[in-house]
Amino acid sequence: MRIKDAMRESCIRLVVDSVQQLVVTHQTAAAEVAGRLLQALARYVAWSGIELVANERMLPLLMSALQCPAPSIRVGATSCLTGARRRLPCLWKGSRGALSQQTYRLY
């Protein structure tokens, strides 16, 4: 757990930003790579938090990826959104009122 906590505090945002840039850059020329990047990101969402993908930058990218002709990108985007959706009920159970409501509105 200490490694995951350290990543949450220090570098997880950089990982997400890098994945986003790489997916945008490679979604047409290297769709398989872009899809695998999104699938890897989905694994981070499972333990790091919904805010990784439920924000103004990632949500439009994931929504457009769902309409991409490349199956690997659609699968990756679906994995990210599914992981985020599974995390949503956890936010409502906590005492994070404003954050919970703000995150929910992004959907």
Image (cartoon, grey):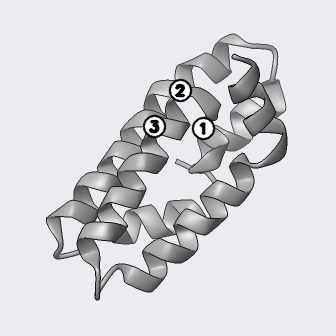
Q: Disc 1 marks which amino acid?
A: Ile
Q: In this view, does 74 lie to the left or right of 1?
A: left
Q: Foreground residue, 5 or 57?
A: 5
Provide residue 26's location: percent of width, then percent of height.
Answer: 38, 81
- Label disc, if present, on residue 43 of the rendered structure: 3
Question: What residue is pinned by disc 2?
Answer: 87
Q: Sequence order check: which comes first, mark 1 or mark 2?
A: 1
Question: What residue is pinned by disc 1?
Answer: 50
Taking the spot 50% from the left edge, 30% from the top edge, the residue there is: 46
Q: Is mark 2 on a helix, strand or loop?
A: helix
Q: In this view, does 22 lie above or below 38?
A: below
Provide residue 25's location: percent of width, then percent of height.
Answer: 46, 84
Distance (Cα) linking label 3 and label 1: 11 Å
Q: Sequence order check: which comes first, mark 3 or mark 2?
A: 3
Residue 77 placement: quadrant: bottom left
Give the residue at the far top of this rendering.
93
Q: Foreground residue, 20 or 60?
A: 20
Q: Is mark 3 on a helix, strand or loop?
A: helix
Q: Sequence order check: which comes first, mark 3 or mark 1?
A: 3
